[in-house]
Structure formats: C-alpha cells, structure tokens
Image (tube, rainbow, N blue to C red):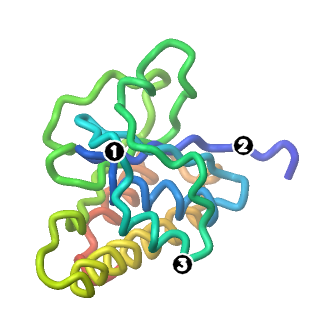
Amino acid sequence: MADEKIYNVLFLCTGNSARSILAEAILQREGLGRFRAFSAGSEPKGAVHPFALDLLKRQNHPVDGLRSKSWDEFAAPGAPEMNFVFTVCDDAAAETCPVWPGQPMTAHWGMPDPAAATGTEAERRLAFSETYRMLSNRISIFVNLPLQSIDNLALKQRLTELGRKPSGSA
C-alpha cells in the first residue's frame, strides 16, 4: 500500500459553504488515505454554514481546518495538482473554471443546495442531511472504482454516469 497512488480531489461549488464542504469531509474519511480531499468556491461565502458543521460533527467528521475558500487557491503556483475536479452545484458547473494544473478528470455531480432550503429549522437541517446522504452514496461508489486498472475514457464515462444518477440515489 505504501506505493499506492494518492489521488487529489477538488469539490467545487459557488459559495463553498455547504455541499462542497460536506463532500470534502466525506471523501477525506471514506478515501481511507488513498484520496486527499479539498473544496473551494467561485464566490466563497467566507464561512462554512453552521448546519454543515453541526451535521459533520454529529457524523464524527473532524471539522478543524474546514473553511470557505476561493478556487483560485488551487489554480495558483504551488497548489496541489488535482487528479479529479467535481462540481457539486449547477452554478459552478456553468461557470468558466480556472485551468487546473495537470489536466484533472472532471465531472458534474449536481446536488440540491441545502443552504437555500426554507422552512422550519428541522426542515432546513433535513435538507443538509439529504445532501450529505446523496454525496456519501456517490463518494462511496467513487472510492471503490478500480481507478488504476481502467482507462481514462472508461473512467470519464463512469464518473459522468455517477453524476447523472437521480437525486434520491447514489
């Protein structure tokens, strides 16, 4: 395992306060040391949504170091080279992204924005839980793909299919 490749994965969203943060935390744990997870936004809010932090804490994810940041950090010289870049919101998918060093594989995994949920506090927290569940399902499938043994075209096809799953499934 010592010579196994570690893949860098960047999750993008516009505000980098909820979906991309949840994905970063989930992959950091589910990746079992084979993946390093990062998140960023095109227009970062500057703070992680408190419901996202509460949910991650309840799910026993470490939250130290999670912060809302610009995707420019990852396009700058000296930034970690990404192997995969996933957009998790439709707005970020439609934007012109920076040129990522190393030409990472990209895919869109559109998720509903829990930060935009309305209703009671319980209903808004449920929106975060649902987004967490959907991301967790997709990330679980992703980390179990045989990345080193399938070619780039087949992998790109699989990642695209994963992003097209109905909202209620993986």
Q: Which mark is residue 169?
A: none
Q: Residue at x 48, y 66 (%)?
A: 139
Q: Is residue 30 above or below residue 153?
A: below
Q: Amino acid at mark 2?
A: Lys
Q: Quadrant of residue 145?
A: bottom right
Q: Amino acid at mark 1?
A: Leu
The residue tagged 1 is 12
Residue 163 in the image: state x and y as whole percent. Answer: 30, 62
- 10 vs 19, left or right, is right
Residue 3 in the image: state x and y as whole percent. Answer: 84, 42
Using the image as rendered, state which of residue 145 and residue 78 is in the foreground.
Answer: 78
Q: Residue at x 23, y 78 (%)?
A: 124
Going from the N terminus, do you reach mark 3 or mark 1 first? 1
Residues under numbered marks 3 and 1 in contact, where contact means CB atoms less than 8 Å apart? no
Q: Which mark is residue 58?
A: 3
Can you see residue 152? no
Mark 3 residue element:
helix
10 Å crowding of disc 1: few (<14), some (14-19), many (20+)? many
Q: Is residue 36 above or below residue 128?
A: above
The residue tagged 2 is 5
Q: Amino acid at mark 3?
A: Arg
Mark 1 residue element:
strand
